[in-house]
Amino acid sequence: MRWLELVLSVGAGLLLLWGILLLLLWWARPPDLTVREALRLLPDLVRLVRRLAADRSLPRGVRVRLWLLLVYLLSPVDLVPDVIPVLGYADDVVVVALALRSVVRAAGAPAVQRAWPGGHAGLAVVQRLAGLGRR
């Protein structure tokens, strides 16, 4: 019986921690960015991250962060399973936003603009996602 209580306690603790982390990720997203708007950009965002990660002109720490982000995005293990409608991809959007903000601070906005594979409207959304505001 003691093992069962231990397993249930650890499971409940992990579930609580997961919920808190989800709330923190949702709170950290840009306030004017909708999940639907960001989800449309996911393929271009993955290409952007890959291009930036391969850019040798960026500092090594930035490239390592980007490779880790790519591994997270391509991994089948997520904070929220992708089978849950809308919320399944929301954690990916928030993690990408936080990583892009970090990369833009270290590498600068011109690196993001050079590597962006999509159109101008998509770049404007990515700039908001990265915390650059409207340009």
Image: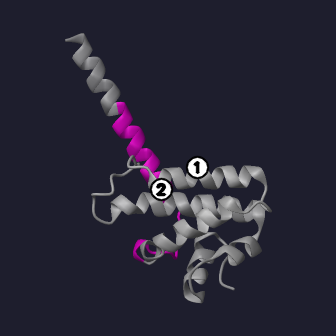
Q: Residues within 10 Å of mark 2 (few under 14, many from 20)?
A: some
Horizontal and vertical percent for residue 5? Answer: 25, 18
Residue 110 locus on image (x, y percent): 76, 75
Q: Quadrant of residue 119?
A: bottom right
- The reply to whether the magenta stretch includes residue 16 is yes
Residue 135 visible somewhere in the drawing: yes
Which residue is located at x 60 percent, y 83 percent? 124
Residue 4 % position (x, y): 22, 18
Examine the rendered structure and indicate whether residue 76 appears above or below residue 99. Answer: above
Q: Is residue 93 left or right of residue 4?
A: right
Q: Which residues are magenta?
A: 13-36
Residue that sits furthest to the top in the current view = 2
Mark-to-mark CA distance, 2 and 1 = 9 Å
Q: Nearer the viewer, residue 81 or 17?
A: 81
Residue 73: which disc?
A: 2
**Relative vertical location of residue 10 with respect to residue 64 in this rendering, above or below:** above
Labelled disc at residue 68: 1
Amino acid type, label 1: Leu
Q: Residue at x 41, y 62 (%)?
A: 90
Foreground: 59 or 21? 59
